[in-house]
Amino acid sequence: MTTVWNLDAAGIDRAMTPLRPDGDATDRRNAFASAAWSFLVEPGDRIAGALVRERGAADALEAILGRPAASTLATIDVSASEMAEALARWEPRLDSAAFFRALATAASIDANLVIPRDEVWPNGLLDLRDHAPHVLWCRGSIGALPSTERAVAVVGARASTGYGEHVAMDFAAGFSSRGYTVVSGGAYGIDGMAHRATLACGGTTVAVLAGGVDQLYPSGHEELLRRIMAAGVVLSEVSPGGAPTRWRFLQRNRLIAAMAGVTVVVEAGYRSGSLNTATHARDLDRPVAVVPGPITSGASAGCHRLLRTNPAATLVTTVAEALELLGEVANAEGGLPADNPDAIRVLDALSSSRTRSVTEIASRSGLAATTVSAVLGTLALDGRVESTEGGWRRIDSR
């Protein structure tokens, strides 16, 4: 049963002050309305997006709370029948008490609320138009929200292989060392490896969740997600309390694709969800970089399918090749010049005959372990070092 919404200015201000401490009353009213839309509708709802675009979040919210006839809300982009169906979808969620509980939950976990008019709003999300999120619920640093030009999405299979995990870590380290933000979904497998490698390099990473940010899902990655909060940002378009349903996972993928200038699919089964991310990237006219795998590996069957069927997909084997798709041609020759001081010190600390750990290399080189990890990732992509189960070793040219 729905309840009457209390939209008095004082109540809105009290609820929104913890989430928008730097805003004024007008800002909080607009943010309140945008947050309400994220509570009322499912991600990617085109009708809600069109209505908010036409009237603004606050006026559109007040309009539907009056239970109007669908014909009065119809626009050139939305027919009366489409609006009637949408109003029927939203009606069961017109629960004021539940929404205010979601706001209180967000405040209790120190979440931030970012809306499209904010300067830190990721510019790539604007390309989603009426399917764009109404807000981003964020935990961590909102300053880590990326611009499309400086972000790369790394996605792939949950049931990853050692090969895929190794490639994901090398690619993420390479992107991070070049100053790119690594965007992924926080899931097991390739996503988790991409996040971990970026953190190890001291880089910035963004995890996009399918459910509310009050529920760190999957639970096995709670520690990882908390580390991401400390160095980057964990976000969702779904209000606190929202469950990570299958539909929301599919819709979550469009945010990953939209925020990044290029989507890199490292490893994917024939029906992997990461193929859905690649489809969103294609629909947004974003390049898709695909890492090939062994033809005998089912974990790479989706990558090979992409290369056969998706015109936007390009085969890549190095970070430089992936970044060429962003126009970064200058770095295509290699990640680190021969006279790079950190590279020289790391190579001097390595042996070609025995492996050494990152800690041992850091001790021998006099560099921080995070710097060593970043340099090793780039040197590996240049074919100058390799990682084995026992650690790292130098590859001497013959």
Image: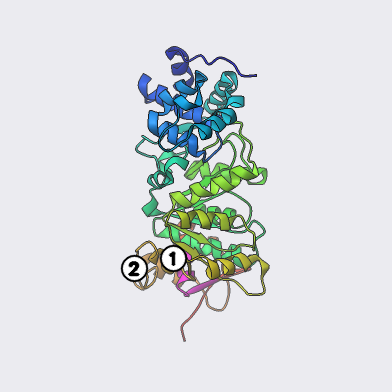
Q: Position of residue 146 (x, y in %)?
A: 41, 47
**Residue identified by numbered label 2:** 329
Specify the segment rendered in magenta: 376-386
Q: Is residue 244 visible?
A: yes
Q: Which residue is mark 1?
A: 322
Q: Are marks 2 and 1 in contact (CB under 8 Å)?
A: no
Type of amino acid under label 1: Ala
Measured in 3D between alpha carbons, the distance from the residue under mark 2 to the one under mark 1, in whole angstroms, is 10 Å
Question: How far across and down, in percent of the image, does residue 32 sit?
Answer: 45, 24
Number of callouts in the render? 2
Membership of 396 in magenta stretch: no
Is residue 362 visible in the rendered image? The answer is: no
Which percent across, then down, holds residue 71? 47, 27
Of 51 and 264, the residue lying toward us: 51
Q: Quadrant of residue 354?
A: bottom right
Q: Is residue 378 rendered magenta in the image? A: yes
Task: Determine the image quadrant of residue 306.
Answer: bottom right
Task: Residue at 46%, 22% (x, y): give it.
Answer: 63
Residue 348 vertical position relative to residue 24 in the rendered view, above or below: below
Residue pictured at 48% horizontal, 60% vertical: 173
Model colouring: rainbow
* Image quadrant in which you'd find residue 336: bottom left
